[in-house]
Image: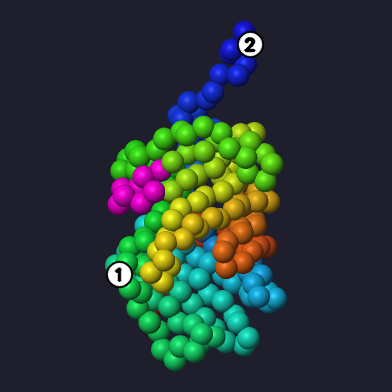
Amino acid sequence: MAFGAIQAQTLDEVINNHITAQGGKDKLAALKSVKFTGSMSTQGMDIPMTIVRAHQMGMRMDMEIMGSSNYQLMNTTEGWSFMPVMGMTEPKKMEDEQFKGSLSQLDIQGALFNYQEKGHKLELIGKDKVDGAEAYKLKMVSKDGKESNYFIDAKTYHLVKTSSKANVQGQEMDVETSFADFKQNADGYWFPYTINTMQGAITFEKIETNVPVDEKLFKN
């Protein structure tokens, strides 16, 4: 009896509970686009931002910084950025390596959803602590061979942290992103409304799902 109480969950159970916590398998399969409206707090500034993501179509992030309009966008074949705040006077195309490393952002249903069909490999490593709370640690090797770790809260089954290694200006760095303040939006999907990144904290005021998206939005 005691053994039954402490028996570790299987990988499938963790993933299934995680999918349920996001709204369920049917809802995730029907998720085609998301529009995030919020701001990023970095270097003492609050930067208004809008992010639009369409499943396997494109991603665009617009930011208003010190009176200038800045954007980053990508589609299935290329990515572009225009950041006047960094001294850019015209849009710049993404380097191939950066573009390939960003392609996973076009999977808005999440890498854990139908991960086997997507060609990813996943392993349940065990448990770890994230901000004092127990979390299941999963190791993923993506279809293109990139390794990353996913931390799923053991009570809520929300994704609370990811970690991976990235090549930044020729140096390998550990990149961590944490997720908090989970809420259910008007369509019944659960999202983190706070994301902490290396660049700063992002807070969303509104998250809209399955909004109409023109693919021209993702073209330079």
176 or 100, nearer to the observer: 176
Residue 194, percent across and down?
65, 57
Query: On the picture, is 130 further left or further right than 147?
Result: right
Q: What amino acid type should be assigned to the residue bearing mark 1?
A: Asp
Q: From the viewer's side, name the closer residue of 98 and 52.
A: 98
Give residue 97's quadrant in the image.
bottom left
Q: What is the magenta segment's predominant secondary structure?
A: loop
Kindly identify which residue carries mark 2.
Answer: 2
- Say left or right for 113 vs 200: left
Check residue 96 in the rendering and tell me which mark sits there, or answer none.
Answer: 1
Taking the spot 38% from the left edge, 82% from the top edge, the residue there is 92
Q: What span is in magenta?
A: 140-147
Out of 190 and 180, give the one closest to the viewer. Answer: 180
| Numbered disc 2: secondary structure | helix
* 27 falls in the magenta region: no
Mark 1–mark 2 Cα distance, whole angstroms, equals 54 Å
> Where does the N terminus fall, quadrant-wise?
top right
